[in-house]
Amino acid sequence: MSKVLLVVGHPDLSQSRANKALVDAVRELAHVTVHDLYATYPDFQIDVDAEQALLADHDVIVFQHPVFWYNTTPLFKQWQDRVFTLGWAFTMDGSASQLAGKKAVVAVTAGVPAEHYTPKARTRPPSRHCSATGTPPCGCASSTSSRWSSCTAPPSASPTKI
Ligand SMILES: Cc1cc2nc3c(=O)[nH]c(=O)nc-3n(C[C@H](O)[C@H](O)[C@H](O)COP(=O)(O)O)c2cc1C
């Protein structure tokens, strides 16, 4: 059976509903390794060699995190930046990546309804209208750490060139 590595980038699973439920559903499976990044690296000091060895030892990698500002969570991003190095994760000379042949799955949770993630969505990523709307939450009606309300892009917002 394929070995599955679940890389979890939730800042605090004890406060989580969605990500905790996903982790709890597979935690006891013998072929699944649950790797909680925030529990492993509370100081954000990632052991790159250990992470690459862990990835090399699994066949399927699941990237799991909540969507934060249309992005990954901070430590998950740090983990990507540090671990997926040139020459190991990807190459420029046509030689094989150490990840070649593995399968990847993205499992993200979001606070706004599914229709907001369609081409006809009423919201747009904050980077496109923050400067037109001022300070965060940049057009969202309101948000809390536990539940986001629906977001509405203000009529005056227009794409801004950065
Ligand atoms: C700082 C922060 C930023 C967030 N940004 C977004 C966002 O851009 N889009 C979205 O759909 N939800 C956003 N959310 C909502 C989270 O994605 C949502 O609460 C989370 O997926 C729920 O999972 P959990 O129960 O495991 O915490 C944000 C939440 C926080 C705290």
Image: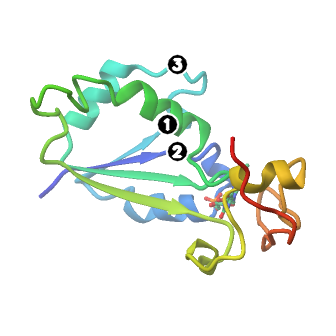
Q: Amino acid at mark 1?
A: Leu
* Front residue of 54 and 33: 54
Mark yes or no: residue 137 visible: no
Say whether residue 118 is left or right of residue 23.
right
- Which residue shows up at 87% across the image and 66% down it? 156
In the structure shown, which secondary structural element does the residue marked by tag 2 occupy? loop
Q: Which mark is residue 72?
A: none
Counting residues from the start of the chain, the first of labels 3 and 2 encountered is: 2
- Which residue shows up at 60% across the image and 55% down it? 67
Q: Position of residue 142 (x, y in %)?
A: 88, 64
Q: Position of residue 128 (x, y in %)?
A: 70, 54
The extreme front residue here reads 161
Q: Alpha carbon of mark 1 to alpha carbon of mark 3: how far?
A: 10 Å
Q: Which mark is residue 45?
A: 3
Say whether residue 119 is left or right of residue 91.
right
Q: Amino acid at mark 2?
A: Gly
In the structure shown, which secondary structural element does the residue marked by tag 3 occupy? loop
* Front residue of 52 and 35: 52
Mark yes or no: residue 41 visible: yes
Other-residue count near label 1 (Cα within 10 Å), few / some / many at <14 / 14–19 / ≥20: some
Q: Label 1 belongs to which residue?
A: 37
Say whether residue 156 is left or right of residue 102.
right
Q: Which mark is residue 9?
A: 2
Colour mapping: rainbow
